[in-house]
Structures are given as structure tokens and as C-alpha cells.
Amino acid sequence: MKTSDEKYDKLLKSLRSEPQLSDLSTIENRVMKRILFEESQVQKNHDFIGFLFGWIYITWIRRALSMASILLLGFFIWQQNSMMNQIEDLQTEIRKNNRIVTYNPSSEIERRRILLRISEEDQQDIIIREKDIISLIDSINNLNVRYRDLINLIDENPGLKKLVEDNIQKKFQSKTKL
């Protein structure tokens, strides 16, 4: 324990004693050179920063740039809102188109040709006239158009849509009960 106290006392004595300086003028010159060098570096950095950001001290430029940034932000928000509305409109169109049975004239011509070929063949004494096939295709097309109109009417009226969905759900529930 005594050795640690002695070491501590020696350390305190050496710290409290004044240092012995041999050459004061060289130390003073080094310190002054270092201070001048650091001041010149700070001055160079300050000049560059002042050149780059000096406009912030001019009030009318600062206000004009602030207003320009607010206008750009408003334009950006408007543009994003517009794009989101367009995407939503496209989604509703896709939902509507998935439900619509489309009428394709080229496929109808092909169907008509196949049905006419089948009707010309004599199969088990059943003969189908061209007039009957054309009438059948026209009624199917008319049914598709009426179905599309009915779907649009249901989509436009939320009360009717809810009523139809409830009726469909009741029918499915009655079939699944055991």
C-alpha cells in the first residue's frame, strides 16, 4: 500500500512542478505558424462556403426560391393524385371488362361457318336449316348485349347490387345445407 502512495506522491510532484523549457523562441514560432496555417485554411473554407451559400443572406432570393419549391411540391402532389386517379379508373375498367362477354365478329363468322357445315351433313335424319342457325347466333348476340347492359345497371345502382348479391348468397347457402 505504501508503494502505491509513494508513486502517487511522485506523480503529483512531477505534475505540480514547472516544466523546464530549453528553447522558448522555437516553440513560440512553431505555435504561431500552426495558428496562422489553421486560420488560412478556415478562411479558404469560409470563402468557398460563402460563395456557394451566400444567396441565403439575400432575402428576396431566399423567398423566391422557397416559393418555387412550394410550387414544385404542389405540382408533384397534383401529378401523383392525377396518376392515382387514372390507375383507379383503369382498374374499374378492367373489372368491368372481366365481366363482359365480348362480341367478336370474326369468331362469330367462324362459328356460323362450322354450324352451317354441321347442318349440311346428314346426321341421324336431323337437318338444321341455315336460317335457324343464323337466328340462334343472333339471339345469342342479343343475349350478350342484354347481359352487358344488365351488369352495367347493377354496377351503377348500389342498392340493386346488394340485393342481387344477397339473393345469390341465399341460393348458394340453401344448396350447401345438408
Image (cartoon, helix red, strand yellow):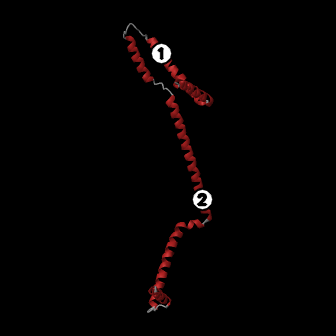
Q: Position of residue 39 (x, y in %)?
A: 50, 78
Distance from the alpha carbon under mark 1 to that under mark 2: 70 Å
Q: Position of residue 24 (x, y in %)?
A: 46, 91
Residue 148's image quarter? top right
16 and 33: which is toward the camera? 16
In the image, residue 44 above or below residue 113: below
* Crowding near the residue tagged with mark 2, few <14, some 14–19, many ≥20 C-alpha atoms within 10 Å: few
| Sequence-earlier tag: 1 or 2 | 2
Tell me the amino acid under the disc marked 2.
Ser
Of all residues, the one furthest to the front in this rendering is 1
Image point (59%, 55%), residue name: 70
In the image, residue 141 above or below residue 86: above
Secondary structure state at the residue bearing disc 2: helix
Task: In the rendered structure, find residue 109 and report the number of the disc placed on it.
Answer: none
Secondary structure state at the residue bearing disc 1: helix
* Crowding near the residue tagged with mark 1, few <14, some 14–19, many ≥20 C-alpha atoms within 10 Å: few
Residue 107's image quarter? top left
Tell me the amino acid under the disc marked 1.
Leu
In the image, residue 1 above or below residue 87: below
Q: Could you tell me if the residues under marks 1 and 2 are in contact, i.e. CB atoms within 8 Å? A: no
Residue that label 2 marks: 66
**Closer to the camera: disc 1 or disc 2?**
1
Residue that label 1 marks: 136
49 and 166: which is toward the camera? 166
In the image, residue 85 above or below residue 109: below
